[in-house]
Image (cartoon, grey):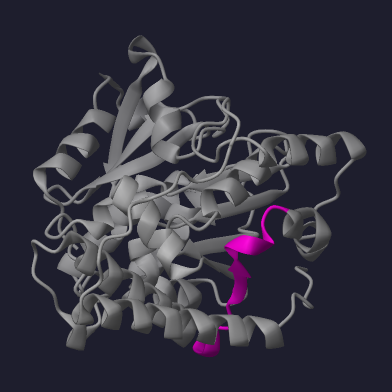
Amino acid sequence: MGINPGFAAEERALLRGLQIDAQDLPTMLGWFPVAINAEAGTLCWRHLGEARFLESFFLDTLNQQAREERQLCQTPLDSLHEQLGGLPQVAPTAFIFHVSRCGSTLLTQMLASLSQCIVMSEPPVIDAFFRYYHAHPELPGAKAIFQNLIAALGQKRRQEESHFFIKFDSWHLPWLPFVREAFPYIPILFLYREPQAVLASHQRQRGPQMIPGLLNTTRLQVADLLVSASDFDGYAANMLAGMLSAGVEHAITEGLFLLDYRQLPNILWDELLAFFRLDCSEHDLLKLKARSILHSKHRHTSFTGDPESRQPALDDQRLNFIHNCNQFYLQLEDIRSKVKLCKVVS
């Protein structure tokens, strides 16, 4: 679960700004946890005030804040519960896990267009917590700390806010049972896509989980399909097989709700709004549908479809990787066909 210097630099960039003494703050409302100082055992916060998280990722919202407006503070990690005292909160509505490049960002962007929704897309403090816990498995009260981190992210800053969604990073799939244990009654969605489309997207622009050595993803790799670190396409296929395999396992053991890329965007207004008891006006529905035709990661640009990708010759080993991905994908499709969104969030 370690990070390379690039990730460390990114985290350090989050922590540049005017340092505020947390003891001088009357409330933590409008302050959001962004990182964990492992050596000091402290939690780092950034002040966002009234700003909504409308960008495709949590980091994008932070980075858009003017440099002169950036304020930070630190509190002991083990006192997190005290920082939340009296802080108005919205309980989680659902957690979103995914295999990457499968429509999860589009789903969160559509939800974020609704004023009643708080949407946190891959907040870096969750990744920081998983890395910290991985390095310190003896951490006392780990589950409570995680629950409080989620509560801190779900601050209620507006009267209309009633629903709260969090999208996890794709490499967080091994932590899904821990998330389920911490929140046993919160629905978990798992999004996936036809494997070759996912791999083609990573050929165009590779995510960090698909680059050997950038993240510690050994818990996701299929053990009998180990590949050379120089084989980026083989490594990506191996990683995807691990993610799809984890999805199959957790769909059975953790009661996931499965969504295939092909169901988007219509499934949001056809089924998910009712499932989450999200009351939408006609104006809200128009906003949802308007957002659905824009690029998921560039919300001011129309989406015109994925460009064609090169199709390299497939040797026997690569064909084996693709075969494994396809087998897991078909298993997910089989499970999805038998389990419908029949429950309603209370």
Determine the residue positioned at 45% across, 30% down.
61
Q: Where is residue 339 in the image (x, y as percent from the top left)?
A: 70, 84
Q: Is residue 150 above or below residue 337?
A: above
Q: Is residue 9 above or below residue 48?
A: below
What range is drawn magenta here? 251-265
Asked if residue 200 lies in the magenta stretch, the reply is no
Q: Where is residue 75 in the image (x, y as percent from the top left)?
A: 30, 41
Q: In this view, does 196 lie above or below 247?
A: above
Question: Which of 122/72 is in front?
Answer: 122
Q: Position of residue 167 (x, y in %)?
A: 50, 55
Q: Classify residue 5 by image quadrant.
A: top left
Would residue 86 be visible to someone looking at this image?
Answer: no
Q: Position of residue 216 (x, y in %)?
A: 17, 64
Quarter of the image with the C terminus in it = bottom right
Q: Classify residue 109 by image quadrant.
A: top right
Count of number-bearing discs = 0
Quarter of the image with the N terminus in it = bottom left
Question: Which of 267/134 is in front?
Answer: 267
Asked if residue 264 lies in the magenta stretch, the reply is yes
Furthest residue toward top: 68
Determine the residue positioned at 42% across, 76% down.
244
Q: In this view, does 269 lie to the left or right of 75?
A: right
Q: In this view, does 282 lie to the left or right of 82?
A: right
